[in-house]
Amino acid sequence: MEKIDEYLDKNLNYVPAVAGFMVKDGKVLLGLRKKVSNDLGKDLYAGIGGKVEVNESTDECLEREILEEIGVKVTKYQKLGQLKYINPHNPKWDMEGHFYLIREWEGEPHETDVIKPIWFDIEEIPTDNMFSDNKYWLDLLFSGKKFEGGFLFGSEKSQVEEYRLIEI
């Protein structure tokens, strides 16, 4: 049995979070993370999102976070991915991420004190300046495929040690 399987079998205290990826005309909107509350991901590009609040669904969180972070109201989206992030060396970063493909919205994305939104060609996404797991599953998301899995990180918070990823 692999190490990741042992962790996935445990009932860890995952923090639920969401990230949405707005796509239009072969481009995707990523947010440059300017200010983060837990020192996770500062100065990286990521989907737009954040932590799910108490009594809030992941859909509600997605809508709230995108409105707060870039001033856009999402109107058509689909949840495609669910991933568990296991950080044995820093359990406060144990998270369960819910990933959305967003096809329609109202308003124009604008910069806030937390996020600087930038459009990229889907073929030219800066995966070297994103969370290290993104390169494993972004193609599934952009293809409209559903997926789930888990990532086990080493002592370096950005180092993927093992992962499980399945298309469902």
Image (cartoon, grey):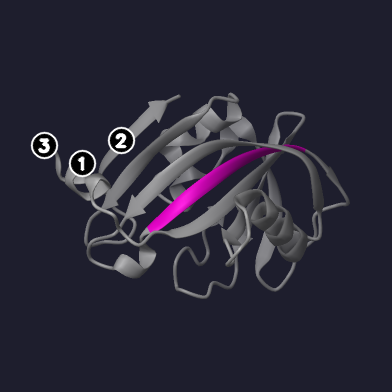
The magenta segment: 95-103
Determine the residue positioned at 57% across, 52% down.
Answer: 18
Image quarter where the C terminus lies is top left
Q: Which residue is mark 1?
A: 5
The residue nearer to you, when weighing 114 against 78, is: 78
Q: Tell me which corner region of the image, top left, top right, bottom left or bottom right, holds residue 88.
A: bottom left
Mark 2 to mark 1 CA distance (whole Å) = 9 Å
Q: CB of mark 2 within 8 Å of CB of mark 1?
A: yes
Q: Residue furthest left?
A: 1
Determine the residue positioned at 75% across, 60% down.
Answer: 70
Q: Which residue is mark 3?
A: 1
Mark 3 to mark 1 CA distance (whole Å) = 6 Å
| Res. 164 mark | 2
Determine the residue positioned at 26% across, 61% down.
Answer: 156
Question: What's the magenta bit mostly, secondary-structure-wise?
Answer: strand
Q: Tell me which corner region of the image, top left, top right, bottom left or bottom right, holds residue 57.
A: bottom right
Could you tell whether 69 is left or right of 38 in the image?
right
Report x, y in % for residue 83. 42, 44
User: On screen, 15 above or below 80?
Assistant: below
Query: Depth-wise, is mark 2 or mark 1 nearer the camera?
Result: 1
